[in-house]
Each structure stands twice: as C-alpha cells, then as structure tokens.
Image (cartoon, rainbow, N blue to C red):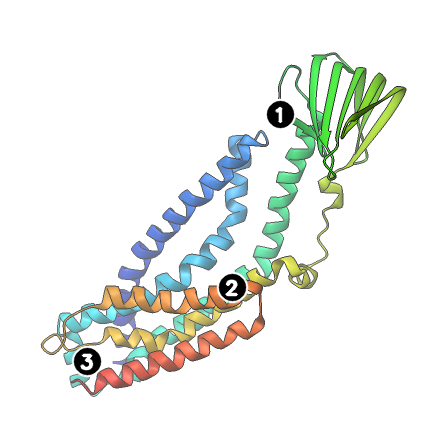
C-alpha cells in the first residue's frame, strides 16, 4: 500500500514537473543564447564554439530553474489531487499529510544533493572553461588585426591598420586618451605582431608619437617602439574548487548557490499549501506558488546584494512563515 501510494504521488509529480522544468530551461536558454550571441560583436565565434559556451552555462541554468520548477510542480500535483477529490480518498485510508509529503521530501533531498554537485563543483570548472574560450578568442582577435577596419583595439589603444602584409602591417595609427585629460596619437610606417608564449607584442618601426595636453603638443620621433599586452588566457588560472569560491568576485554567486540548494527541502512545508478542500476554498495554487517563490528569492537577492552570509537567515524566516501559513490555513477546514 505504501509503495503504491508513493509511486502514484510521484507519477503525478513528474507529470507536472517535466513540462514546467523544460519550459523554464527553454526560456533561460534563449536568454543565454542572446548573451552568447552578443559576444560576436566583440569576438568572432563559430557555431560550435557558441554551442560549447552554452553547455558550460547549463549548470547555472539548472541552478536557477530546477528549485522553483520542483516546488511549483509539487504544489500543482497536490492541488490537482485535491481538486479531483483523490486526496479525500487518500485521507480516507488514514494517511496523514506528513506521510503524503514523504516521497516529495526524499526527492527534494536527492535533487538538493545533485544541485550542490552542479553548483559547487561542476559550475566552478565550467565557468573557468567558458572564460578560457572567451579570453582565447579575444587574444586571437588582437593578433588577427584587419586592414581598413575601425574600432580595433590593442590593450587600451584604438588601432587602425592601412595595409596588411605577410608578416607585417603598414600605415599604423594608434590613439589613446589619458586619465588626466591628455591624448596620445602614434603613427608608424610598419608594425609587427608577435605572440611570444602568451605575451602579445606590437613592434612599431619608424614612427612619430604625439602627446597632446592643454595648449601643447609634443612630438617624439622613434625608430622602434614596443607595446606589450599580457594574454588573458595566460593570466587565467584554475586552482581548484576551494580557491575558486574563495575569490571575492564569486561570493554573491556562492550565496545564491547555497540559497538554491536550501530552497528545495525548505520549500516542502510551503508546498503543502497545494492541499485544499475544493468545496471550502478556491484553487489559487498557481498564483500562490509564484508569490511564495518571489517572496523567497527577491528578498534574498536584495539582502545579499553585497554578498553578506547573513543573507542565509532569509530561508529560515521564509520557512517559519510558510509553516505558519499552512497551520493557519488548516483552521479554515
């Protein structure tokens, strides 16, 4: 009897979960592809590279969509059973609410463990691989300068090339605006681009440098001038999962990952609000599930804007509030 009940409840759950999860992943994937496509305005990417960047973003997509999908699916499945009066039959066999929620809770714990694996381990490595591809393409774009194209950059300099040869460039112009309001303009007859072990070097030959400041222009003639730009891939390092999350830049993402993992088991008391008596109250499961999800994540995001770990108090307050809400609703029946 107990095994049949668990299977029956889970079959109803998966019928609601997979369509909802698939829809949210699809929406998040569209947003992700738009973001990846925006890279093409800066670097040239092939279709296979765009697909690879999307694969590396999948752990983050799952991290955002799976907790809410599961919570809403549990509420909807319980609401459907209540509306079809099947929950009345289950209660008729003297099965309590906690017994009904047991299979959902077990699945929530398993999904939380999977989400922790994706969020803390896989996400750290995939984030490094994604940045490695982007930085490598940016470095390659600096090497493959095109003649006659405006808007090209080498480091902090705007670069224009008049003519492209086999091993060098001709008619070089560089421009940079200084932090104190001054400007610098460099022209050169020839230039050579080299990648020496990840160190990008631009060698200018036979040129002039103009330093422009308030009311004065200073000219310097030179035979050779060299600009160095460290490769971003060369500077990129992966020192393991612990070192990755110790980086202050990822503190907010770490807190979001913890919140997403905690949301799965903590949301089960709130999901019990899907159980209702169709003759006593109207079915507002959909809006209720959406409102409770927003009530969890929006305050957490606002409070955790600066990355404070005391943000983790939000799930505890939300858990107590939803449990009180469920106990209050029981008195209506």
Q: Is residue 140 left or right of residue 31?
A: right
The picture places residue 117, in percent across and down from the top left corner, at 55, 63
**Residue at x 27% of width, y 71% of height:** 9
Residue assigned mark 1: 151
Tags 2 and 3 touching, CB below 8 Å: no
The picture places residue 179, in percent across and down from the top left corner, at 73, 39
Q: CA distance from mark 1 to mark 2?
A: 37 Å
Residue assigned mark 2: 256
Q: Residues within 10 Å of mark 3 (few under 14, many from 20)?
A: some
Q: CA distance from mark 3 to mark 1?
A: 69 Å
Q: Is residue 102 visible?
A: no
Q: Is residue 63 left or right of residue 235?
A: left
Residue assigned mark 3: 90
User: Looking at this view, is 3 or 88 the one in front?
Assistant: 88
- SS for tag 3? helix
Q: Is residue 204 visible?
A: yes
Q: Residue furthest right?
A: 223
For marks 2 and 3 on the same chain, the one whose residue lies earlier in the sequence: 3
Q: CA distance from mark 2 to mark 3?
A: 37 Å
Image quadrant assignment for residue 93: bottom left
For marks 3 and 1 on the same chain, the one whose residue lies earlier in the sequence: 3
Relative vertical location of residue 287 with respect to residue 20 in this rendering, above or below: below
For marks 1 and 2 on the same chain, the one whose residue lies earlier in the sequence: 1
Image quadrant assignment for residue 91: bottom left
């Amino acid at each position: 009897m107990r095994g049949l009940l668990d299977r029956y409840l889970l079959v109803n759950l998966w019928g609601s979960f997979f369509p909802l999860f698939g829809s949210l992943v699809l929406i998040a994937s569209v947003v992700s592809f738009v973001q990846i496509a925006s890279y093409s305005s800066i670097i040239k990417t092939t279709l296979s590279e765009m697909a690879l960047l999307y694969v590396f973003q999948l752990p983050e997509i799952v991290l955002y969509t799976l907790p809410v999908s599961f919570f809403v699916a549990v509420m909807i499945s319980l609401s459907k059973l209540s509306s079809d009066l099947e929950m009345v039959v289950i209660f008729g066999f003297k099965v309590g609410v906690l017994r009904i929620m047991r299979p959902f809770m077990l699945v929530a714990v398993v999904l939380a463990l999977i989400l922790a694996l994706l969020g803390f381990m896989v996400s750290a490595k995939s984030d490094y691989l994604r940045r490695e591809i982007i930085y490598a393409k940016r470095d390659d774009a600096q090497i493959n300068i095109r003649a006659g194209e405006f808007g090209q950059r080498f480091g902090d300099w705007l670069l224009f090339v008049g003519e492209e040869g086999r091993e060098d460039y001709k008619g070089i112009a560089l421009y940079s605006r200084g932090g104190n309001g001054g400007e610098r303009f460099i022209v050169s007859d020839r230039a050579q681009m080299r990648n020496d072990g990840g160190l990008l070097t631009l060698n200018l030959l036979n040129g002039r440098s103009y330093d422009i400041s308030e009311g004065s222009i200073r000219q310097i003639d030179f035979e050779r001038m060299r600009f160095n730009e460290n490769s971003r891939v060369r500077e990129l390092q992966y020192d393991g999962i612990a070192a990755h999350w110790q980086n202050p830049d990822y503190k907010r993402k770490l807190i979001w990952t913890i919140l997403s993992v905690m949301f799965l088991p903590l949301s089960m008391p709130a999901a019990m609000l899907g159980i209702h008596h169709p003759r006593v109250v109207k079915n507002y499961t959909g809006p209720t599930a959406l409102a409770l999800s927003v009530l969890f994540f929006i305050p957490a995001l606002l409070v955790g804007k600066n990355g404070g770990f005391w943000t983790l108090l939000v799930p505890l307050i939300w858990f107590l509030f939803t449990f009180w809400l469920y106990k209050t609703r029981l008195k209506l029946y």
